[in-house]
Image: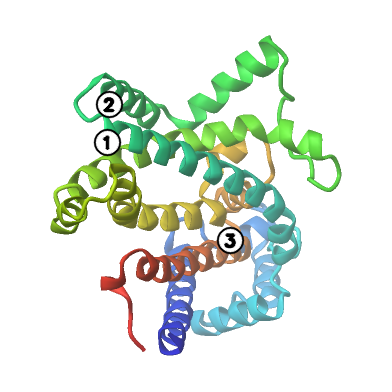
Amino acid sequence: MRGFVARRMAGMALVLLAVSLTAFLVFNVIPGGDPTVRIAGRSASEQTRAQVREDFGFDRSYPVQYVRLMGQVLDGTLTSYPDRVNVRDEIVRGIPATASLVIGAAVIWVLFGVGFGVLSARYAGRWPDRVVGALAMVAISLPVFWVGAMLLYYLTYRVELFPPGGYVGLSEDPGGWLTHLLLPWFTLSLLFIGVYARVLRTSMLDAEHEDYVRTARAKGLSERRVMTRHVLRNALVPLVTLFGLDFGAAIGGGAILTEAVFDLHGVGQYAAGAVDSLDLPPVIGTTLYAAFFIVLMSALVDIVYGWLDPRVRVDG
């Protein structure tokens, strides 16, 4: 296990290096990527622009700029170009909103996704399966921004059951924290509930035809124990992969649309603003932040795999 963890940590470092290098190179070849114009202004003289390039190090070679940028990432001094705001501080400021949104939504989508998936598999071909399948397809088809906008319009501005948006800290006001996040939780989780229900249904139906399930039934085990200990446990393996990637991407800033609709000011909303303004330091910072969580969740998925299915355990 120690060797496995060491290999995963080394792989994580290589992935983060590759992601940062790719983001840096892509940013410097896109049209309008030169930050000198945004800092100095479009009407600035060439002398002023040359001074800005010298002050910010833009006149140096790309390898030198990249190494300098990574050094600022490591020591926490990375700042945005136009307003010189510390990137790490901005990301840390947005983490509570993003974490609250994603963790709460993840609990909802796992519970309801697994519940509906089990229900659909147990009554495959009958009316509960058809109802769950239809609702799942509707949930998958609805755009996140449309769901959020409709919930805000009807439940906030028409009925006034929920606040209009924004984020309230849990320690500041637990009740306000909950009421501000109920609609974002539902909005973000709806798509995943539909996907997880369909994937688990298919996985459970496939598992029911495996030899080990037939053997368990032949031994006289109760149907409930067969379903929970053998069918469901093995059917959860593909769901673990989905959850690891979905959760890592969402908490890494993938919930951009939900954060934007409900004005939560999380990491995703900060990343979207950085891309919109073509500000390289926040782009690099948020990209590495997102990549870290995705790679971390991928490693945790491998460990959970070994617990769910001994056949895939990694030796060493």
The reply, left or right, for residue 26 in relation to residue 126 is right
Which residue bears the numbered disc 2?
A: 129
- For the residues labelled 1 and 3, say whether their Cβ atoms are less than 8 Å apart: no
Residue pictured at 70% horizontal, 80% vertical: 75
State how far apart marks 2 and 1 are (Cα). Answer: 7 Å
Residue 301 visible in the shown view = yes
The reply, left or right, for residue 41 in relation to residue 268 is right
Q: Nearer the viewer, mark 1 or mark 3?
A: 1
* Label number found at residue 121: 1
Q: Quadrant of residue 129?
A: top left
Element at label 3: helix
Q: What residue type is labelled 2?
A: Asp
Between discs 2 and 3, the one toward the N terminus: 2
- For the residues labelled 2 and 3, say whether their Cβ atoms are less than 8 Å apart: no
Q: What residue type is labelled 1?
A: Ala
- For the residues labelled 2 and 1, say whether their Cβ atoms are less than 8 Å apart: yes
Mark 2 is surrounded, within 10 Å at the Cα level, by few (under 14), some (14 to 19) or many (20 or more) other residues, namely many
Q: Quadrant of residue 240?
A: bottom left
Q: What residue type is labelled 3?
A: Thr
* Label number found at residue 300: none
Residue 166 visible in the shown view = no
Which residue bears the numbered disc 3?
A: 286
Q: In this view, does 316 lie above or below 117?
A: below
Q: Which residue lies furthest to the front in this view?
A: 220
